[in-house]
Amino acid sequence: MIHPLAASGLVRRYSLPRQGLLGRRDVLSAVRGVSLLLEEDKVLGIVGESGSGKSTLARMLVGLEKPDEGEVALFGTPISGLSEADMRPLRRHVQMIFQDPFSSLDPRMRIGESVAEPLDIAEPRLSAAARHARIAAMLGRVGFDESVMTRFPHQFSGGQRQRIAIARALITHPKLIVADEPVSALDVSIQAQILNLLLDLKAEFGLSMVLISHDLAVIRYMSDRVAVMREGVLVEENETEALFAAPREDYTRRLIAASAFSNEIGAV
Amino acid sequence: MLAVEDLKIRIGNIDLLRGLSFTLGRGETLALVGESGSGKSLTALAIMGLLPPAMQVHGAIRLDGRDLLALDEPAYCALRGRKIAMVFQEPMTALNPVMNVGAQIAEVLIQHGLLDRQAALAEAARLLDRVGIADAATRLGSFPHELSGGQRQRVIIAMAIACQPTLLIADEPTSALDATVQVEIIELLAQIRAESGMGMLFITHDLGVVNRIADRVLVLYGGMAMEEGDAQDVIAAPRHPYTHGLIAAIPRGNARTRPLNPIPGQVPGAGRFPPGCAFFSRCPRATDLCRNVLPPLSEDGHRAWCHHVGRKWA
């Protein structure tokens, strides 16, 4: 069986600024040997606190950053040796959704063009009519009518912008999405809308997804499997409900206790 | 101790806060809960006297009987940090990056003429110890960038309680922190409130935090009060459809077994609210009455402002 995403032994080090002119350069290991496997049609949640290396990991998984060691394979193809040209056909099947919908859309680009950009790269020979239809259909799917195509990002709220960013990510009909804190910048009532939208689209498009968040409640809601990341390594991984029912690591237990904050609020 | 009466904040002809009233007693914690645009942070700034001059403020804010809105700036300066202190969301921007933390805490005490420099530094060390910073005497010389986010927030809390204020306003004090650190800071604030007897106005978007720290809660939406009462009561049995929707939007479990019902739509922009209930455009029970007429107060265990509170939210 071909996995949409497989990573083995990923390591990423950053060298810190020199301590003084002739000083030594310290090295920070952001990710220190991470292996993971994403099965088709599943959501793998990666939870970690700030500084755990989860965003660095996300960028390596989609090829935005090269690991110092280890290998990422997308749909069975290792990406480390690929040229930019060989990478391109893979890239349309892999998209990323970021935390901040304010900085992930170009403020000077009309919504229609922002959403179309990945499509123009993936399918440059699309006719104008077909292109327009694809954009309109995708925007419709995230809850907008065609008229938004000529508007600019600043005319939308945070939640609306995140829906536009999702339309942009899905316009090429990717098979794999890596979402890094997709709802952290949003109000509670909007968060739930976006989470449900992501799950609906996942079912509709047959997506596999890696979801990265600091929020354990969000991870639990969305994921089939959960991996807990701390200081650059995965300390525990399991099926979602098994992990919550019987966490093995002390750190996982502490995270669960801290997020029990919201669990204390009974069902309404 | 604190009484806010019919507080209205406008900019130009746009209403940002549409008549808010609440009280806060000594030793009590009141949580102001709301999403962006609800007016919760504006309320805090109004109490601190820190609203931009372009905003017009009406109503009254009384602290121990004194109307703060009538104060001039020098009188307010004597009050800020002394009687009313504030803890902000982002500890890095609230601290001076080029001054060590000991001097920053001592400065508050010196400015208000409570202690001389030497005594103030000794008091700063005691305060750092009180907020749970290990090896406090040495840490006086640390700069903000040498501390973690949680430690910086502890320093901010030490500064805030330095003059033993009667009112502490905490505006999203834990929202920028990791979950495990969040718990520690909440516990610290609860302890300090209990031993000092100050009143605490706790501003947050997170009902989970409310449940842990607040005695009472006031839920805001679009610059209006939706519901108010005992925190446990309101969260266990919300009477207002907005509060109900907020609670229902918090994930608890997995989507396959416990799917969420989000509040539909989005918060209208400032100035786009109807003359009646601010929640009108997103409310599952909204009628024409709600759009046009301000909802009356209904009191039954706790207070809710809604035309349809009597109905069950299934």
Image (cartoon, grey):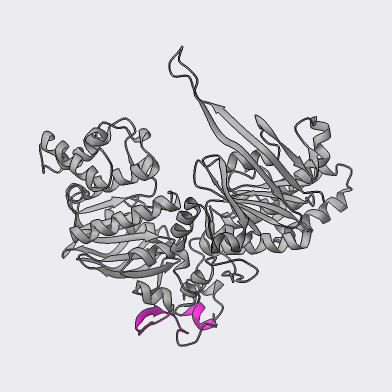
In the displayed structure, B198 sits above or below B102; it is below
* Res A206 → quadrant: bottom right
- Examine the rendering and report whether any part of residue B267 can be seen: no
Q: Residue at x 49, y 44 (%)?
A: A50
Instruction: Judge from the rendering whether residue B123 lies leftward or rightward of residue A80; answer left or right.
Output: left
Q: Residue at x 73, y 59 (%)?
A: A202
For the image shown, how many numbered marks are present on the structure? Answer: 0
In the displayed structure, A241 sits above or below B96; it is below
* Res B20 → quadrant: bottom left
Is residue A37 in the magenta section? no
Residue sitting nearer the eye, B83 or B235: B235
**Which residues lie in the magenta part?**
B288-309
Residue at the bottom extreme? B310
Q: Position of residue A75 (x, y in %)?
A: 80, 45
- Examine the rendering and report whether any part of residue A228 can be seen: yes
In the displayed structure, B144 sits above or below B227; it is above
Q: Residue at x 77, y 62 (%)?
A: A204
Is residue B303 in the magenta section? yes
Q: Position of residue A4 (x, y in %)?
A: 77, 48
Residue sitting nearer the eye, A64 or A48: A48
Q: Position of residue A182 (x, y in %)?
A: 60, 52
* Res B287 → quadrant: bottom right
Q: Position of residue A47 (x, y in %)?
A: 56, 51
Instruction: Judge from the rendering whether residue A247 lies leftward or rightward of residue A94; answer left or right.
Output: left
In the displayed structure, B288 sits above or below A139; it is below
Residue sitting nearer the eye, A66 or B112: A66
Instruction: Judge from the rendering whether residue B124 lies leftward or rightward of residue B307; answer left or right.
Output: left
Instruction: Judge from the rendering whether residue B248 lies leftward or rightward of residue B83; answer left or right.
Output: right
